[in-house]
Image (cartoon, coloured by chain):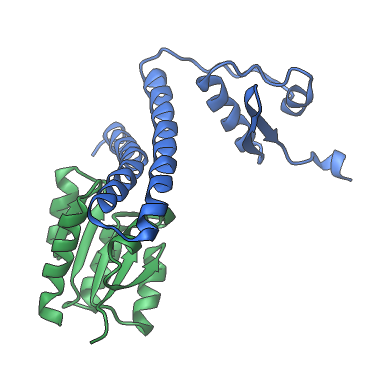
């Protein structure tokens, strides 16, 4: 069986490298902006999106809004430094399936990713 | 949200990003070292942690400057200065502290230049400021 595909959307190259290493059991695609992520998804479907909340040129909320409109069943995990409650509430209202803050625990991230992917196997 | 509240919200957001991102890298790689035994992780993670720690230290220096400015402990007085001459002079800019270096970096970057650092044996760190040539000098 081929590995589940995860798209990591984060403008920080070092953070993408950490997530690529952490999610080594999955086929990880990367995008540094929301625009690149949306373009990539048109041609290359994935099973899960890990989405940063602060991206160059757009907010994660804008990207999440488009993602959920185009791909309603695609799970989205918001992974962000934004600890303020209003950001979490906004993400949830836009359909985020999970919301974790940085710094995150590797075990918690992996457990959340596996939980979100369990119905797509 | 008022203009002042929006400014504060943006500042918190920026600082949060600058501080939490390197911290997340340190925690993430440290946890990977705890749970993984593969050679690549053992080899790369310590380097990544050290690089992230340096990044965090730089972000904290920036935060200290922002806090000092916000508290009114620092003031900025616009004074005409020929930056190119100052940097090219024998003494260069009088950089005596982290704050001096931070301000110098901002000045150089505002003028389209770059900053780099190199270790000098027995003398510590040598900071090099590079400015683009002025139009008349490049002709």
Q: Where is residue A3 shown, x and y percent of the image?
A: 26, 80
Q: Position of residue A105 (x, y in %)?
A: 19, 50
Residue at 15% from the left image edge and 56% from the top image edge: A108
Is A59 drawn above or below residue B50 in the view shown?
below
Q: Is residue B118 above or below residue B33?
A: above
Give the answer, above or below, for where B122 lies relative to A41: above
Residue B2 seen in this snapshot: yes
Left or right side of B107 for A76: left
Residue at image coords 45%, 32%:
B58
Q: Residue furthest bottom?
A: A1
Image quadrant in which the N terminus of chain B is located: top left
Task: Name the residue nearer the viewer: A91 or B44.
Answer: B44
The quadrant in which residue A56 appears is bottom left
Q: Which chain is blue?
A: B
Question: Could you tell me residue B27's position as x and y percent?
Answer: 27, 44
Q: Colour of chain A?
A: green
Who is closer to the viewer here, B52 or A97? Answer: B52
């Amino acid at each position: 069986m081929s590995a589940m595909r995860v798209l990591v959307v984060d403008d920080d190259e070092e953070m993408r490298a950490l997530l690529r290493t952490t999610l080594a059991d999955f086929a990880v695609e990367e995008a540094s902006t929301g625009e690149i992520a949306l373009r990539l998804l048109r041609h290359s479907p994935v099973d899960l999106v890990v989405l940063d909340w602060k991206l160059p040129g757009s907010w994660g909320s804008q990207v999440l809004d488009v993602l959920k409109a185009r791909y309603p069943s695609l799970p989205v995990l918001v992974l962000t430094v934004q600890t303020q409650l209003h950001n979490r509430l906004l993400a949830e209202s836009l359909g985020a399936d999970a919301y974790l803050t940085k710094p995150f625990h590797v075990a918690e991230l992996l457990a959340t990713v596996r939980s979100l992917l369990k119905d797509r196997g | 949200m008022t203009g002042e509240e929006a400014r504060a919200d943006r500042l918190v957001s920026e600082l949060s990003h600058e501080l939490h991102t390197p911290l997340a890298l340190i925690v993430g790689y440290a946890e990977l070292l705890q749970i993984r035994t593969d050679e690549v992780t053992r080899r790369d993670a310590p380097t990544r942690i050290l690089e992230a720690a340096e990044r965090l230290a730089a972000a904290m220096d920036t935060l200290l400057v922002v806090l000092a400015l916000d508290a009114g402990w620092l003031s900025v007085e616009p004074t005409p200065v020929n930056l190119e001459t100052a940097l090219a002079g024998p003494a260069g800019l009088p950089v005596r502290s982290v704050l001096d270096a931070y301000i110098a970096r901002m000045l150089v970057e505002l003028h389209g230049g770059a900053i780099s650092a190199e270790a000098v044996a027995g003398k510590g760190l040598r900071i090099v400021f590079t400015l683009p040539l002025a139009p008349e000098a490049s002709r």
